[in-house]
Image: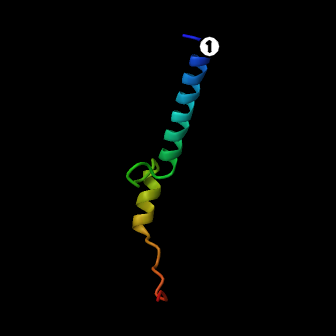
């Protein structure tokens, strides 16, 4: 292996790790909780009032 191919592999793995971190922090793949379950339960316990003035 040459030094150029090692650098390319490192860059690919770093970009993959950053992409996975971004997806996990923004709701995950299924739009679920994203890791903070207490926050999710709190939103369900106190739902936001719906806007009644929509046309």
In the image, residue 10 sits, relative to residue 3, either above or below, namely below
Q: Nearest the camera: 20 or 4?
A: 4
Whether residue 26 sits left or right of residue 11 in the image: it is: left
| Residue drawn at x 49%, y 39% as measured from the top left | 20
Q: Quadrant of the N terminus?
A: top right
In the image, residue 54 sits, relative to residue 36, either above or below, namely below
Whether residue 19 sits left or right of residue 7 in the image: it is: left
| Residue drawn at x 61%, y 20% as measured from the top left | 7
In the image, residue 42 sits, relative to residue 33, either above or below, namely below
Q: Nearest the camera: 19 or 49?
A: 19
| Residue drawn at x 50%, y 51% as measured from the top left | 26
Q: Quadrant of residue 15?
A: top right
| Crowdedness near tag 1: few (<14), some (14–19) or many (≥20) residues, C-alpha within 10 Å | few
Query: What residue would you read off at disc 1?
Result: 3
Query: Hey, which residue is sitting farthest top in the picture?
Result: 1
In the image, residue 19 sits, relative to residue 11, either above or below, namely below
Q: Position of residue 40 (x, y in %)?
A: 43, 58
Q: How many marks?
A: 1
Q: Position of residue 17 (x, y in %)?
A: 52, 34
| Residue drawn at x 58%, y 24% as measured from the top left | 8
Q: Position of residue 33 (x, y in %)?
A: 42, 53
Query: Hey, which residue is sitting farthest left in the picture?
Result: 30
Q: Position of residue 16 (x, y in %)?
A: 51, 34
Q: How is the image coloured?
A: rainbow
Provide the secondary structure element on which disc 1 rests: helix
């Amino acid at each position: 292996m040459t030094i150029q191919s090692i650098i390319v592999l490192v860059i690919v793995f770093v970009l993959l790790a950053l992409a996975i971190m971004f997806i996990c922090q923004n709701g995950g793949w299924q739009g679920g909780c994203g890791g903070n379950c207490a926050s999710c339960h709190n939103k369900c316990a106190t739902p936001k009032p719906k806007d009644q003035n929509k046309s």
